[in-house]
Image (spheres, coloured by chain):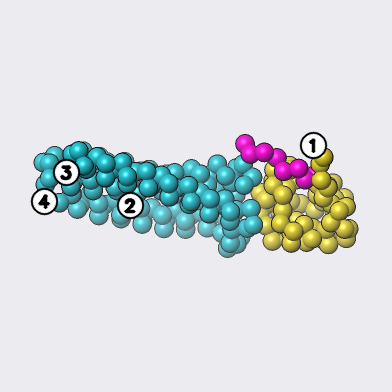
Amino acid sequence: MGKRPPITNRVRELRERHGPMSQAALGEAIGVTRQTVIAIEQGRYSPSLESAFRIARLFGVGVEDVFGWEES
Amino acid sequence: MSFREKSAWVMAAVIILAGLYYLRAVLAAPHASGAASPPAGALAGYVCLVVVGSVVAQIVLALSAPKEAAHPADERERPALQRAGHWAGFVLAAGAILSLGNFLYRPDGNLLFHLVLGSLIASQIAEYVFQIALLRRGA
C-alpha cells in the first residue's frame, strides 16, 4: 500500500448532501470512473487540479471548501 | 472492480493459459540440442490462443459493461497502466539478459528461443499483475 497523500477532502459529505448523488453519477459528471471517486473519497488518490475544480463547481463551492492540506 | 482491472485479470489468465499450452508443447517435443528450428506448431498455437482468447475475452467484458468499456482510461488509471508497462519492461530485459547469459555457457539456439519467448510471456503477465496492484492501490 502506497503512502497516503496529505490531502483531505469532503467529497463524500458533499456528494451525500447533493441529492444524494451516487459515486457513479459523480464520476460520470467529472469524467472519471466510479473506482476513482471511491479512491478520492477514501483519501487514496488525489485528483488532478482539473478534476478538483470540476468537483467544486459541481457542488457549487470553492476548491478549498472541498480539499484541505493535512499537516503532519 | 473497475473495467481496467477486470480486463487485466482476464488478459493475465489468457496469457497464463496460452503460456502453459506452449510450455507443454515444448516439453513434449524432442529435445535435440541445436535442432534446426523451434517447434513452429507450438508457437502458432500459442499466438492463435492469445489472439482468439484476447478478442473473445474483451468482447465478453465489453458486452458485460458496455458503458465502462466505451470510456478511455481516466486520470488515475492512465499512470497506473503506464507504470505497469514500464516495470514489465524491466522483467523482459532481465529475462532477455539471463537468456543471453545462458546462451554463452550453453549455445543452444532452440533453448535461447524458448527462454526469450518465456521472458516475453513473463513480462506480459507481470504487466497485468502490476496493473492490478497499482489500480487497487489507488495509483
- Looking at the rendered structure, which numbered label has been put on residue A72? 1
Q: CA distance from mark 2 to mark 1?
A: 52 Å
- Secondary structure category for the residue under label 1: loop
**Residues packed near mark 2 inside 10 Å, few (<14), some (14 to 19) or many (20 plus):** some
Q: Which residue is mark 3?
A: B108
Q: Nearer the viewer, mark 4 or mark 2?
A: 4
> Circle 2 marks a residue in which chain?
B
Q: Which chain is cyan?
A: B
Disc 1 marks a residue whose amino acid type is Ser
Q: Horizontally, is B106 left or right of B65 in the view? A: left
Assess disc 1: are there few (<14), some (14-19) or many (≥20) residues with their C-alpha within 10 Å of its C-alpha.
Answer: few
Quarter in which the N terminus of chain B is drawn:
top right
Q: Is residue B66 above or below residue A3?
A: below
N-terminal-most mark, 4 or 2: 4
Q: Which residues are magenta?
A: A1-8
The lab-note entry on whether marks 4 and 3 share a chain reads yes
* Dots 4 and 2 on the same chain: yes
Identify the chain of the residue marked 4, using the numbered disc in the image.
B
The amino acid type, in three-letter code, at marker 2 is Leu
Q: Position of residue A30 (x, y in %)?
A: 73, 60
Q: Nearer the viewer, mark 2 or mark 1?
A: 1
Q: Are marks 4 and 3 in contact (CB under 8 Å)?
A: no
Name the residue at 25% across, 54% down: B44
The residue closer to the viewer here, A17 or A30, is A30
**Mark 1 and mark 2 in contact (Cβ < 8 Å)?**
no
The three-letter code of the residue at mark 4 reads: Ala
Q: State which quadrant residue B126 falls in.
A: top left
Whether the residues at callouts 1 and 3 have beta carbons within 8 Å, the answer is no
Which residue is disc 2 drawn over? B49
1 or 4: mark nearer the eye: 1
Residue position for label 4? B36
Kindly identify the residue that appears in the image at 69 percent across and 61 percent down: A31
